[in-house]
Each structure stands twice: as C-alpha cells, then as structure tokens.
C-alpha cells in the first residue's frame, strides 16, 4: 500500500490532469472540434500528443524493465521511426491536410471506392477495439498488484478518468491533456534517473555503473548480425521497424487523429519531425534508467521475483518449501555477488589487476548461482499455478520506485504511470469514436447534421470506453491473448499501409485492384504468422510490399474503364 | 498623390521577397528531413560506439 502523502500527490495530479484537459477544451461544440480539435493545434502540442499516444503505461513500466532484463538492445526497435517520420511528412501528411479529412479512411474513398474505405476502417475497428481493452487492462493489473487494489477498481478508475476527459472535451481535451501528461512523465523520468544514480553505492558514478552493466552485456545496443527470427537487431529495426512505424503513424487513426489536429500541414510535419529527432535518444535514456536499476540491485538485496502477488501465492502454496529454499539460495548468492562486485570495483580503482580478476571470477560464479536459484523460484511459481505469468519485467521499475524513492516522488511516479495509461487509451478511444462516427454513422447516413453527429461521437466514445473496460475484465482470464493482441497490429498494419501507398504511388490502380491485392496480402501475412518462424516486425514489410506490388500488377492488366476512383493524389 | 502607388509597389516587392517560393519551401523541408536522418545516423553511431566500448 502507498503512504498517505504519496496518495495525496497521486490524487492531486490526476484531478489536475483531467481538469486541465477539460477546461482547455470546454468550448468544443462541433464535430471537427470533437474529432480532430478543429485542426487548430500548434506543432509542439501535436508533437507531445503523438509521442504521448505511443508511450503507453506498459511502455513506461516495461521499458525500464526491458533495460533491466535485456539491456539496451530494445532501442533498435525505434531505428526505423525517424525514417518513417520523414516519409510521412513528404507523402501522407500534406494529402490529409489538403483534403481536411477527419479520419485517414475518408481519403481512401476519395481515392478508390467505398469498399476499400470500409475494409481499412473495419480492420482498424476490430484491431483497435480489442487492443483498447488490453491498453487499459495491462497497467490496471500492475497497479492493482502494486497498490493492493482490486483490478476492477483500477480498471474502472482509468476508464472513468478517460471518460471525463474525452466525452466532455473530445480531441482538443486529449491533445491538451497529452501535452501536460507527457511533460509530467518526462520530468518524472528525469528526476527518477537522477535519484537512481544517487542511490548507487558510495563512490560509484555513472562511468563505474556502465562498466558493471557492460560486464553483464546490458550495454549491447547495436547488433549488426542478420537473423530474421531475432526481433532486435539493426536490420529488423531499420527495415521492419520502418514499415511498422510508417503503418502505425500513417494509417492508424489513433495516430493520424493526432496529426490531423495540427492547424496546417507545416505544423503537422514539424510535430512528426520533432518526434523523429527525440524518439531514439528518449528511448535510450528510459532503457538506461532500467540498466541503472539493474546495477543498483547488483549491490543490494533484490526480490527473487518482482511480481509480489505471484511470489506470495508460491510461498503459501504446496510448493512453498521449494520456493523458500530457492529464495534463501538467491539471497546468499546475491550477497556474494555484491561483495565480489565491490571488491572488483575497489581493485580496479587501486590498479590491482590480479585482485580484480579474482573478484570478477567470484562475481561470475555468484551470478550463475543466483540465476539458477531464480530459475528454481520460477519453477515453484509454475508448479503452484501452471497459468501463472512468469514474466515479471513490468514490475521491476515500479517495485524499485516504491522501495527506494522519497516520499511524495513515489506518488508523482504513480501519477505519471496513470497519465501514460490515460494517454494511449484516450487516443485509441477518440480514434475509435471518430472512425465509428465518420466511417460508419456518417457514411451510412444514420445522421447527417452537425448536432446529431456530435452526439453520436460522444455516444461512440462512451460505447468504446465501456467496451474496453468490459474487455479488460475478461482479458485477465485469457492470459496469452494479451500477447496475441500486441502482435495483432502487425498482422494488419502492413496491408493497410500497402493500400495507402498504392493510393499515393500507383495512380493507375483502382478500387477493385487494391481491394483484391489487400485481401491476398493479408492472406500472405496470416500464412507467415501461422506457418513460419518469421519475427512479427517482418510481417509489416511483407503485407505492404505484396499489397502494393499486386495492386500495381492488377492495375496493369485492368481495362481503363473498369478502374474506379477519380481522385488523383499528388504527394 | 504619387505616394500611394509608390508605397503599393514597395509593399508588393516586399511581399514578393518575403513570400516563400515553392522551390524554396521544398528545399527548406529537404534540409529538415536531412537533419532528422543525420541525427538518426549519429544516434546509431554513438550507440554502436557504446556497444563496442563496454563489450
């Protein structure tokens, strides 16, 4: 449980976030204002909104955890992002802004036909509708375990905060809230970074910490080997990552909706380019924060397993003796490790190479012993409950914060996690509402006047929030679905991107050609998922290239009068 | 009487000078894109150096 002052900071921060967003957006009275903030935002707000949308609470909690477990290699995942930002600025952003659309899929009807627009919008609604539940569920679960609150309460609290902000204020409130939320998140991360550095053993600075981290392989940031099954290497990051980010920012309404809030193409482009400039350094520092937590825990007692709920279950279960034995061995091996590392550090500074080598060998042996003890502890958790989640990465950073940071700062970090959870949920739900209203309600002419459409938008937002909170309650029982939904984006992104790139670059292609190509491209991606060990980042490339190539091929063999769509895009 | 046309001409030439041509705009954006790509290359180089330095 958290202390009263931390709880007070958490409550004040959350209320401030909601009130800020609502009051900055209380004049929202029209549909474009509700869906895309009336195309009125300056580039800094667009930049923060785009970045806040991508940085979900899971990213915020899991990225330092990822740094702790796997080091800096995850940073390669973002190498394709700056290239994608440049390509989007040169192609799709000017087209979206010129057409003054409210959703990305409106452009597809203007360029091709209604069925292509419906296909893309439908794929988006299915994929995002499910992941909206998981976006709420994942942080709600971690917060419920850490705070000792019921998962239904943390889910409902997150849902309520999101509802209050976006049903009343719409996209303008989302953009304004994002700017403040992301500032709080970055400020909190910077403060935490400084505090973790200060918490290192006496006489140890950043250079010494890097030596300890490097000796454990945590500073291997760039892997130039080419292995299609390896998710994190330079080539997967540059190529697969490029197509993933291009699809995500260019065709996913939760990001396109943020870009469309810009008051002009110039402001939208500047927002994206700013994102392209700061994303890799920002992810590097968040991962480095995790690496520093790893170093700090090398010198002091660390839990054998960071998820306290699973640990308590194992200790109280039928395999409690095995758990306790593993925990004892872990503690003694870690004490030995800390001693050996201190001796190595002292010998290095004294210039005693022999003592340093001896201490290093002791540290390696203690490290192996502690890894074996942890494996036995995880075995006890699995033996107690075969469905238990044995991945504790998401809990590492929060556990460190709760046990190490000063009073008040803990509340601020928890508020930042809530803010991050709200960030991505708000964009997703606003995008789902926009697509439902514009691509379904308006398209099928269920409503046409501004007032009714605005009412539909608010209703659609409420519907998707209730759907997400409801699905979040159910997601806990589905276990592996959480992972399945995470890779679901890559199942569809490549195909959707292929449709958009065909719209821009294959001027001869009509609706029939791109629709058929998209169906075949999607079938190929599903075949890759089911039949090959190919990492999911590559699916984006395959879906995109196949859709684009097949559409060009079909267009070449389609008689001119059979092509549909008259809009000529000029990127 | 003759001041008004002169001022209008001066204003027009100022507008001409200040209004960015399509080519100038494209060149400015191209430079901005290059800066972003150069920053990425620098990031990768620094990270590669870090990897090798602490291997």
Image (tube, coloured by chain):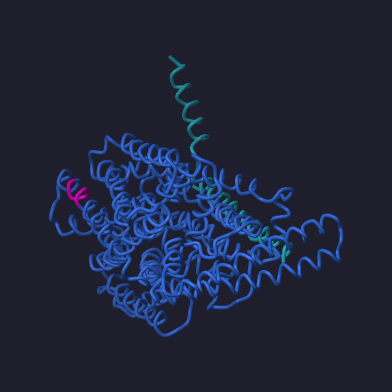
Q: Main secondary structure of the magenta part?
A: helix
Q: Position of residue B33 (x, y in %)?
A: 55, 53
Q: Is residue A444 left or right of residue A206?
A: left
Q: Quadrant of residue A105?
A: bottom left
Q: Position of residue A270 (x, y in %)?
A: 48, 46
Q: Which residues are magenta?
A: A455-459
Q: Is residue A428 left or right of residue A198?
A: left
In front: A60, or A532? Answer: A60
Q: Position of residue A267 (x, y in %)?
A: 44, 44
Question: Quadrant of the image for the C terminus of chain A?
Answer: bottom left
Say above or below: A302 vs B4: below
In front: A72, or B44? Answer: A72
Residue sitting at x 32%, y 59%: A132
Q: Position of residue A89 (x, y in %)?
A: 46, 54
In front: A497, or B8? Answer: A497
Q: Residue furthest top?
A: B1
The answer, for residue A157, to whether it is visible in the render is yes
Residue sitting at x 28%, y 35%: A26
Q: Look at the image and give the colour of chain A.
A: blue
Q: Look at the image and give the colour of chain B.
A: cyan
Say above or below: B18 vs A216: above
Asked whether A205 falls inside the magenta stretch, the response is no
């Amino acid at each position: 449980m958290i202390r009263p002052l931390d709880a007070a900071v958490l409550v004040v921060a959350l209320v401030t976030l909601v009130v800020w967003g609502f009051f900055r957006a209380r004049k929202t009275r029209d549909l474009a204002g509700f869906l895309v903030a009336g195309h009125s935002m300056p580039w800094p707000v667009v930049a923060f909104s785009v970045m806040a949308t991508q940085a979900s609470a899971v990213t915020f909690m899991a990225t330092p955890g990822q740094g702790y477990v796997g080091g800096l290699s995850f940073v390669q995942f973002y190498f394709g992002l700056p290239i994608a930002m440049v390509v989007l600025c040169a192609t799709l952003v000017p087209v979206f802004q010129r057409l003054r659309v409210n959703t990305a899929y409106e452009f597809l009807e203007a360029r091709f036909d209604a069925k292509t627009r419906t296909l893309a919008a439908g794929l988006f609604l299915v994929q995002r509708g499910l992941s909206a539940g998981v976006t709420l569920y994942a942080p709600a679960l971690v917060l419920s375990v850490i705070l000792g609150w019921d998962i239904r309460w943390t889910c409902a609290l997150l849902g309520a905060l999101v509802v209050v902000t976006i049903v009343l204020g719409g996209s303008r409130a989302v953009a304004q809230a994002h700017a403040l939320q992301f500032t709080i998140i970055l400020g909190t991360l910077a403060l935490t970074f400084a505090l973790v550095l200060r918490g290192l053993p006496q006489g140890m600075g950043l250079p010494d910490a890097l030596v300890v981290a490097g000796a454990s392989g945590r500073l291997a940031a760039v892997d130039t080997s080419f292995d299609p099954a390896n998710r994190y290497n330079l080539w997967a990051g540059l190529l697969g990552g490029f197509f993933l980010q291009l699809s995500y920012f260019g065709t996913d309404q939760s990001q396109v909706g943020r870009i469309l809030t810009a008051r002009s193409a110039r402001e939208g482009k500047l927002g994206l380019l700013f994102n392209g400039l700061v994303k890799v350094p920002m992810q590097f520092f968040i991962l480095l924060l995790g690496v520093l937590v790893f170093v700090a825990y090398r010198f002091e007692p660390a839990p054998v397993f960071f998820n306290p709920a699973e640990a308590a279950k194992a200790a109280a279960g039928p395999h409690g003796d095995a758990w306790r034995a593993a925990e004892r061995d872990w503690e003694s091996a870690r004490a030995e490790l800390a001693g050996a590392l201190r001796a190595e550090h002292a010998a290095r500074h004294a210039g005693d190479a022999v003592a340093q080598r001896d201490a290093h060998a002791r540290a390696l042996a203690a490290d192996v012993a502690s890894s074996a003890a942890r494996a036995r502890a995880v075995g006890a958790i699995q033996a107690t409950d075969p469905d238990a989640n044995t991945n504790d990465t998401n809990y590492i950073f929060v556990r460190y914060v709760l046990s190490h940071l000063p009073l008040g700062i803990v509340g601020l970090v928890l508020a930042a996690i809530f803010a991050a959870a709200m960030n991505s949920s708000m964009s997703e739900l606003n995008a789902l509402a926009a697509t439902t209203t514009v691509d379904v309600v308006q398209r099928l002419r269920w409503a046409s006047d501004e007032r009714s459409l605005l009412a539909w938008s608010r209703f659609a937002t409420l519907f998707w929030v209730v759907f997400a909170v409801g699905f979040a309650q159910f997601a806990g029982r589905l276990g592996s679905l959480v992972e399945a939904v995470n890779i679901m984006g890559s199942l569809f992104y490549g195909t959707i991107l292929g449709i958009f790139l065909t719209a821009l670059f294959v001027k001869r292609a009509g609706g029939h050609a791109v629709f058929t190509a998209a169906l075949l491209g999607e079938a190929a991606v599903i075949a890759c998922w089911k039949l090959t060990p190919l990492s999911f980042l590559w699916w984006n490339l395959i879906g995109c290239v196949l859709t684009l190539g097949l559409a060009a091929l079909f267009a070449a063999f389609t008689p001119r009068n059979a092509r549909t769509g008259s809009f000529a895009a000029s990127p | 009487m003759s001041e008004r046309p002169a001022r209008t001409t001066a204003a027009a030439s100022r507008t001409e000078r200040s209004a960015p041509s399509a080519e100038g705009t494209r060149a400015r954006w191209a430079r901005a894109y290059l800066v972003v790509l150069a920053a990425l290359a620098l990031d990768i180089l620094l990270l590669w150096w870090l990897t090798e330095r602490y291997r």
